[in-house]
Image (cartoon, coloured by chain):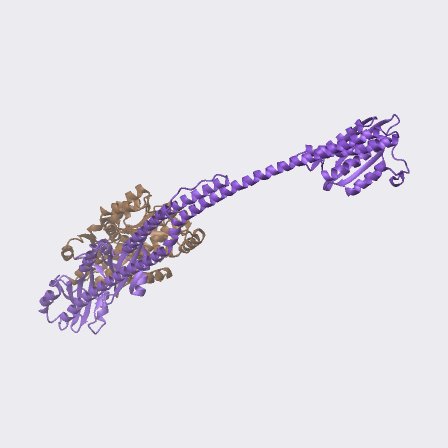
Chain colours: A purple, B brown
Amino acid sequence: MISLTGLLPVIIMSIGIFISIQRGINDTVIQRNQLLAKSIALSIEQQIRDATTLLISTTEQVDAVKDAEYKRFMEASLVSSGVYESFYAINEQGRVIYSIPQNDVFTGFDFSQQTVIRQVMNRSTPAPAYSSAFISTQTKNPTIVVAVHQPYGIYAGYLNLTWLSRLSKSLESEQITSLSIVDRYGTTIANRNRALVEEQYSIANTELFAWAQKSGTGTLHHQFENNDVITSVNFIPGPNWYVFISEPTKSAFRASRDVLFIGLMVAVFAIIGAILVGYTLGRSILVSIQLLTEESQQVQAGVYRDIQHAGNYAEINRLIETFNAMSDEVQKREIQYEEANRQLEHALQQKEILLKEIHHRVKNNMQIVSSLLSLQSDELVCEEDREFFENSRLRIQSMAMVHEKIYQTQDLESLPLKDYLQDLVELIIANNQTFMEYAVTGDAPIISLNQAIPCALSVFEACMNAIKYGKDNDGYVKLAIAIQQEEQNWVRIIVKDAGPGFPADFAPAKSRSLGFTLMLGLMDQLKGTLRWYNDAGAVVEFLFQLG
Amino acid sequence: MKIAIASRISLLLLTGGILFGSCGQKPIRVGFIGGLSGFNADLGISGRNGVSLAISAINKAGGIHGRKLELLVRDDKQDPETAPVVFQELVSEQVVAVIGPMTSAIAQVLIPLANTSRIPLISPSASSPEFSGIDDMFIRLTTPNTNEALGLAQESFQRGARKACVIDDLSNQAFSKALVRTYTAELRRLAEEKRKEIAVVALPFDPKDPQGMQTILIGLARYQPDIVLFATNSLDTALLAQGIRKKGFTMPFLGTGWSMSQTLIENGGSAVEGMAFTVPFNPNSEAKAWKEFSELYKETFGKPADFGAHQGWNAVQVLAGAIAQGGTRNIKEHIINTQYQGLQSSFVIDAFGDPVIPFQRLEISSGKLVAHE
């Protein structure tokens, strides 16, 4: 493409030169034909004029009737010389006095009706008149009659035009042009094809003749018998003929076509050469680019190799060197990143282990605190105090469970709420000698460590209330915990028993219930809400947004 | 009988050109055969010129149903051996019809070929009665010369001729033989009717014989006819007439349509003054179409339109009318039994392809052909 782009101005310039050359050649051909037509026209005009002059000068002072001795002289100068085919001396009435060489055959014949004789009969000067061309019955050649009116008679010479045919035949040998001579009516009087002359072939109805009559001289590009032809014309005054030099356009402009052909061939070879050179050069660039592309893909895939390729261009080689350096650098950095990653992962693992250990230790400590409370509660006599201790111990247990669940998880930051509540209820059951059944249903959201402990303590308190106050008539506790995860990460936990429900005048503030006080406080901490109501038992409902 | 006048044909050609005009259509090829070189060329050349003008006019008006006519011209050289060759050339060029030949001698050779190839052969001027009454591919635009011979015989008899002489051209026997026979028979019939004595002599004339004129002059000197009928071409008629007058003969001359041309008048001079003709043509017709044609012809070819040109033009009109009506097939069927408006008068072509045309009596007077009642 680059080569072609470079060639474009050269091609445009070449086309311009070719067009100029072609025009120059075409103009030369046309000028040559016009010159040829003009030369032939002048030559014919001169020959006719010479023949006419000879006739006029020979007959100038001849009295056809009285000077019969001149007959031999005129025969010698006009007919035997080969200028005229025959000669007629005619009187003022148009009758033949004598003729040469037919002797007496035509003597006495009336020629007064012949157009050319009539023309000169009415003239007082020896201005010549020319007949239309016709085929002589004697020679079978195109002939014209030249007639003059002299003081002592009318003289008519039959001018044989065989030399016109010879003229057109001489051009035939050139094999480039065709010469035609037509009379004022378009009738052919000379052509290399003699049949056209004999048949008096007429071009009167053609575009060419109409143009020739109008222009007189010049060159016409036209169609003739379905051929593309250029014809140069020149008018011959006197006999009023036209000389046509015709040539098929194909052969006339062959030289310019040859030049064009050669030019085109050179252009085609130049373009092909340019394409080949461009292709060879471009191919070496493309190979380098292809190599670079492939190696770039390898770098993307993590394979680092040095490109071992020596191109033809320093720029390409520099690009390859730069690529190799870049590849090495990327490989070095990747190794560094991998090492840093490994260190970070190690640190993270250490941190996780540490965190798990902390949670484990917190849980163990809480277990110890719980055990201590349990041991101390055994020394208490008052049942109510023991209950306080027991509840506190369970509260600590429930918090320890949170830490236990936390270090059992992967991320050490959150725990599955549903599993936890399940374990919590089982812990409560295990520490209360009450007949009860329970069910934890609904969604299974993940809750963070920060929210897990307030949530756990809240649910614990609700469960403890249910165990304490939610027994049915048979002393049986039926506990149902439902978890609903709602839009915008809100979670609703519903703790329901099948007991007698809240008293009608239940008011947490007045009841001095620690459980409700804790629940209210914990929900406040979670920026949530607490509801309680009766629905075939007491229902406590927590609503808060997961953080 | 179908009626088709020239104006209708022209209208048909024009509307056809508008309705079906198409530049890309191939031209319809029409052939022409005539004697264009040699001694009898003037009739052939006039015929060709008339045909050429007619075709040019049709093409300028848009052609026939948008298709142009292409004229292919061949010279039969008045040679019975050349004519079949050029006819076959035209057949191989796929012409739809051939206009020609101009003489009976050539028509005699070409009619069998036309019948074989089923190409209509439309002769503008071949007038031998041998071609009449035959249902074949030959169609002509002039009546059999027997009609002409009858008129000439009546003319001779009216002028009081009792020793008639016919100069019989040996190169066109198909024409002159029938003419001489009919002329002689009619003269004898008229003489018998009026109980008069009459003698008719035919002097053979060979146009290629340099001594042909002398032979005729010797024959005339011996026979001393009181009227001479020239069954020869125009130039030969002119020169023979000049030769006869030069010898002091003063008998009236009669001519035929074959010789009736400008060449005869120009070369015959005062010798052909008073020569009478009985022909289906009048060069001084006042018909508008003829006047326009004459002007165009003179302007184009530089000489007055004559019988051959007139017949050539009419032949093309007849052919074009048939093509316009029925296409390039069955041309003959669309030509026959039809009335046409020619350049000078209307005429009918009968079922056998022969025309029925009114005859004119013409006479050369002061270098011009003048019609006489």
Whole-percent x and y of residue A296? Answer: 47, 42
Whole-percent x and y of residue A359? Answer: 70, 35
Residue nearer the viewer, A492 or B336: A492
Q: Quadrant of residue A365?
A: top right
The tally of labels here is 0
Residue nearer the viewer, A447 or B224: A447
Q: Is residue A431 visible?
A: yes
Q: Quadrant of residue B219?
A: bottom left
Whole-percent x and y of residue A454? Answer: 77, 38
Q: Is residue B189 left or right of residue B291?
A: left
- Look at the picture and state if B17 lies above or below A69: above
Residue nearer the viewer, A369 or B122: A369
Q: Is residue B41 left or right of residue A429?
A: left
Q: Is residue A418 visible?
A: no
Q: Is residue B214 left or right of residue B365?
A: left
Q: Residue furthest right?
A: A505
Q: Quadrant of residue A211?
A: bottom left
Whole-percent x and y of residue B177? Answer: 23, 49
Query: Residue at horizontal 51%, vertical 43%?
Result: A333
Pick the quarter of the image with the C terminus of chain A. Answer: top right
